[in-house]
Image (cartoon, rainbow, N blue to C red):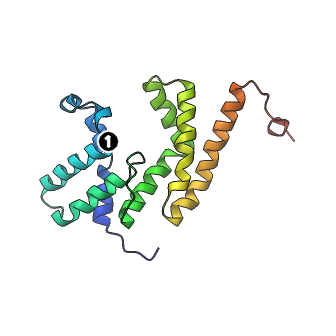
Amino acid sequence: EGRRIDLEVLLAAAYLHDVGRLADMMPLARAVPPESEPHATRSVAFAREILRGIGVFPAAKIPAVEHAILAHSFSLGERPGSIEAMILSDADKLDAIGAQGIIRTVAYSVELKRSLQDTLDHLNEKILRLKDTLYTPQAKRVAVGKHDIVVRFVDDLVQGLAGVPERASNTSSK
């Protein structure tokens, strides 16, 4: 609010922030196991080459794009130092919570053959913490409802797995 946003930096970072994940699907990139280097680090390397290679993106703005990409990563712990990095970080986190975030988490867990407990741990230890790591007031407002969806899902799942009957208030048809 009231801050100038460099749309060139923001859009380039938004388009390229997960390009390192795509590299995992490419035969040549498989020489480097995904676990050996965080996807954000790989994304920065690919983004730098792409932006330099197209020849029209301002070279002076490439470091700002690189910073935004690195700072979007929850696991790297790098704090955003620009509004563009804050917006990208918030957008990425908002994408990870709510109903879509639950589906993505479950699908990824199935792909990796994670146990149900590991999936619940991921939801509790990462996804439910994202709301408290947002930077912009707009993202914080949007996160409230999305966070509540995840809380209800986790609570209902834990309750169901424990064999506890649903609360009467949830099942009444009044």
Pick the front one: 75 or 172: 75
Residue farthest to the right? 174
Direction from residue 63 to residue 114 in the image, left or right:
right
Mark 1, residues whose alpha carbon is within 10 Å: few (<14), some, or many (≥20)?
many
Residue in the picture at 68% in, 37% down: 155
Q: Where is residue 108 in the image (x, y as percent from the top left)?
A: 45, 31
Residue in the picture at 16% in, 50% down: 49
Q: What residue type is labelled 1?
A: His
Pick the front one: 173 or 153: 153
Is residue 14 among the parts visible in the rendering? no
Vertical side of 63 occupied by 30: above or below = above
Q: Position of residue 88 (x, y in %)?
A: 39, 57
Direction from residue 91 to residue 170 in the image, left or right:
right
Query: What kind of element bears circle 1?
Result: helix
Is residue 86 among the parts visible in the rendering? yes
Q: Mark 1 points at which residue?
A: 39
Q: Position of residue 73 (x, y in %)?
A: 38, 49
